[in-house]
Image (tube, rainbow, N blue to C red):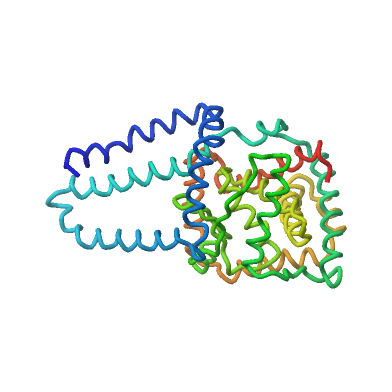
């Protein structure tokens, strides 16, 4: 590549960023032409290319990229003083290519229409509506717990291997797609991350690799959440970038699954978000509601908390803050807090579709 071409490509990150900001103002265009158009072909092509491989190709790419970066810095650090533009141009050139590939492969989904507008439901809800929905969610969770646990005070234990959970996770999407074709999920590409131990120390249950469209799950944490975490990452794959929307679509897929363990995972996981919101709004109602929840469900929650406690470390807040900045840079103005905004989708969606 000529020097002029390298310069132009490196500087192209500026018009790229401007174009992204312009598109952010036209979510209808992104929804129609990218999320429900070009992206579907891109995502399918990636999953056909990498989904059949039993290990995470994306994790291998990341490892090789990290090695290549370290090698570049080792070999070229001395040239910073002699040829500063050449050094920084190579970095800018790489960033420009990664930026282009990220938004073309998946990232533009951050700027699609908000899900509540697509579903034609409200974005707000009252405390009374929240409490009413939470009561119903508790009943459903308790009923499933009774069917799956040895006693009301025992945690539900998953009887499946990781591979079996991945295979079953697509069944919920198959059910959803009967009424909502845009939620179809095929071919599949969900795997255990090769970086599950680092993910545990970073505090993450999984992630989507936007460059290979592989759903990555932290395989260290095998508890009641595993099915819905898998469904959450698959929701990212089909084009829902926002965390609250991926949480909601993952919940729909888990609870639509014919397997009761998936249903329990979906209801119990979302119940925790609802209870947290009730606690924030009305402490007395929170106490009343939690008294009606089986102790075994709390045991599942405790199991999850103990797992993450094992991996607490001084660097975890740094990783979380970095992800927070990333989310805010992609139109999720409240960062990590957007995970909990799933409650609004849950409450308003179930006004017309009772549990």
Q: Residue at x 33, y 38 (%)?
A: 13
Q: Residue at x 25, y 59 (%)?
A: 73
Q: Nearer the viewer, residue 107 or 142?
A: 107
Is residue 22 rendered to the left or right of residue 134?
left
Percent of width and height locating residue 261: 76, 62
Is residue 128 rendered to the left or right of residue 195?
right
The answer to whether 27 is drawn above or below residue 334 in the figure is above
State the image quarter where residue 219 is shown.
bottom right
Q: Quadrant of the N terminus?
A: top left
Q: How many marks?
A: 0
Percent of width and height locating residue 43: 51, 46
Outermost residue on the left side: it is: 82
The answer to whether 311 is drawn above or below residue 85 in the figure is below
Percent of width and height locating residue 106: 49, 44
The answer to whether 245 is drawn above or below residue 215 in the figure is above
The answer to whether 199 is drawn above or below residue 173 in the figure is below
Q: Residue at x 68, y 44 (%)?
A: 342
Q: Nearer the viewer, residue 34 or 244?
A: 34
Percent of width and height locating residue 283: 79, 50
């Amino acid at each position: 590549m000529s020097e002029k071409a390298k310069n132009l490509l490196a500087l192209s990150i500026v018009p790229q960023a401007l174009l992204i900001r312009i598109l952010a103002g036209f979510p209808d265009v992104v929804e129609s032409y990218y999320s429900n158009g070009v992206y579907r072909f891109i995502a399918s092509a990636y999953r056909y290319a990498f989904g059949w491989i039993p290990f995470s190709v994306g994790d291998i790419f990341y490892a090789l990229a990290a090695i290549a970066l370290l090698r570049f810095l080792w070999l070229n650090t001395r040239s910073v003083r002699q040829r500063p533009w050449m050094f920084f141009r190579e970095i800018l050139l790489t960033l420009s290519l990664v930026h282009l590939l990220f938004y073309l492969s998946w990232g533009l989904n951050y700027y699609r229409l908000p899900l509540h507008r697509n579903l034609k439901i409200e974005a707000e809800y009252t405390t009374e509506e929240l409490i009413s929905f939470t009561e119903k969610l508790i009943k459903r969770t308790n009923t499933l717990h009774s069917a799956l646990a040895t006693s009301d005070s025992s945690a539900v234990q998953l009887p499946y291997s990781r591979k079996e959970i991945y295979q079953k996770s697509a069944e919920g999407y198959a059910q959803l797609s009967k009424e909502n074709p845009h939620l179809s999920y095929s071919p599949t590409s969900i795997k255990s991350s090769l970086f599950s131990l680092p993910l545990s120390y970073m505090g993450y249950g999984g992630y989507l690799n936007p460059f290979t469209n592989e759903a990555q799950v932290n395989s260290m944490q095998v508890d009641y959440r595993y099915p819905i975490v898998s469904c959450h990452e698959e929701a990212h794959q089909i084009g829902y970038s926002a965390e609250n929307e991926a949480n909601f679509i993952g919940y729909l897929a888990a609870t639509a699954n014919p397997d009761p363990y998936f249903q329990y995972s979906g209801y119990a996981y979302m119940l925790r978000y609802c209870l947290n919101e009730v606690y924030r709004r009305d402490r007395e109602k929170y106490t009343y509601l939690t008294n009606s929840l089986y102790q075994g469900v709390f045991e599942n929650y405790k199991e999850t908390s103990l797992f993450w406690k094992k991996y607490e470390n001084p660097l975890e807040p740094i990783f979380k803050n970095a992800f927070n900045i990333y989310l805010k840079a992609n139109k999720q103005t409240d960062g990590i807090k957007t995970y909990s905004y799933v409650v609004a989708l849950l409450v308003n969606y179930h006004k017309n579709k009772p549990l």
